[in-house]
Amino acid sequence: MSFAPAPPYRHGSAERTAVLLVNLGTPAAPTAAALRRYLAQFLWDPRVVEIPRPLWWLILHGVILRTRPAKSAAKYAAIWTPAGSPLLRWTQRQAECLQAELQARGHSGLIVRPAMRYGEPAIDKTLDALQADGATRVLVLPLYPQYAAATTASTIDAVAAWVARTRRVPELRFINRYHDDPGYIAALAASVRAHWARQPRGDKLVMSFHGVPARSLALGDPYHCECHKTARLLAEALGLGQGDYVVTFQSRLGRAKWLEPYTEPTVKKLAAQGIKRIDAICPGFAADNLETLEEIAMEAKEAFIGAGGEQFNFIDCLNDRPDWISALADLSLRHLQGWPGVASGVGAPSPAPIAAPTPAECAAQRQRALALGAVD
């Protein structure tokens, strides 16, 4: 086995630390050809579809990649902007804003770069570029608040694949989740309040998270629990009672049972129950993308109105909100502590550490999990 040569090294060069912001990915264009390439990479990931490879290859290449690209391209075309993919644009913007925020706090030596798990800019190419820029320490920050094997672990797989072919491996750290991070919850709550200041508050707040197969919960994936914790903390921050909001799951793929309740049937049911106005937010997405702008803001709205609802308001993702960028900076600095140049106290003080839960809080967490159907 051969390893890629390391970038040329200049003795006496300062070592640098980098933050790699990773999101899911996007096709290069809203065309069937671009979607075919993108879906072939995305859907072949065994973390995404856990079906024996020979059988799945036949289904993927014999059926899905022959029919789905054109349909998906039409959906992407509905949300594509003159600047290109909304997800790519927002992720790039988040990286730029995070670097500026860290520099404003006195961490001018930190590099922040965006990358995509599928499509471009690819994780391996971005890591190559960071090494060429002198980065010897990299904090990998997947922009998924709730851990899931299909997202967070898949990002780690991609970094590990790059490591496996790299001669000079940098120090690496990973952020697995931030579903209950105080800054993240505060930014979500502020975005909802800002929306309510512009638009009359709906009768119900729908919190829609991306779905995953229901079997993943039984296999030990904490995603379901972390989505519900995010929803509970957001509701508490907004002063909502249990009857004021509902947690749903979207983007089901295939016929297998996924986490329930599903978003579109739920909004139809709310309309049938006489709910006339709802607000929808997608807390699991750090930036607007196809699943928020088309599936929720368009399709779910059409389903709600078609079932008798009157007003459906979508609340934008956090995107480049200053409070969200500040929360990302706090999160990054907590995980960068101990690396040279980060814990020196230069500039603004480092964020306070988050206290571990007390035994009483752990007991309460257990009771809530059992109430949601946990076995133990």
Image (tube, rainbow, N blue to C red):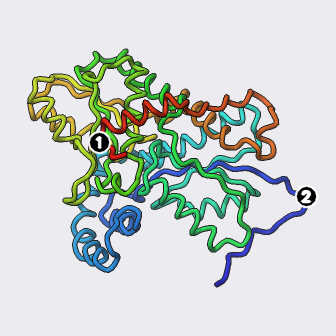
| Label of residue 373 in the image | 1
Residue drawn at 45 percent across, 22 percent down: 190
- Secondary-structure class at tag 2: loop
| Label of residue 295 in the image | none
Residue drawn at 66 percent across, 38 percent down: 334
Q: Vertically, is 78 above or below 323?
A: below
| Amino acid type indicated by mark 1 | Gly
- Secondary-structure class at tag 1: loop
Locate the N terminus and report the quarter of the image it occupies: bottom right
Relative side of 252 to 220, left or right: left
Relative side of 87 to 202, left or right: right
| Amino acid type indicated by mark 2 | Gly
Closer to the camera in the image, 2 or 88: 2
Can you give x and y, in whole percent of width and height, for residue 323 in the image?
Answer: 54, 27
Closer to the camera in the image, 189 or 80: 189
Instruction: Check disc 2 and report the residue beneath it.
Output: 12
Spatial distance from mark 1 to mark 2, Cα to Cα? 58 Å
Q: Vertically, is 213 above or below 5?
A: above
Can you give x and y, in whole percent of width and height, for residue 257 in the image?
Answer: 22, 54
Can you give x and y, in whole percent of width and height, for residue 30 in the image?
Answer: 34, 56
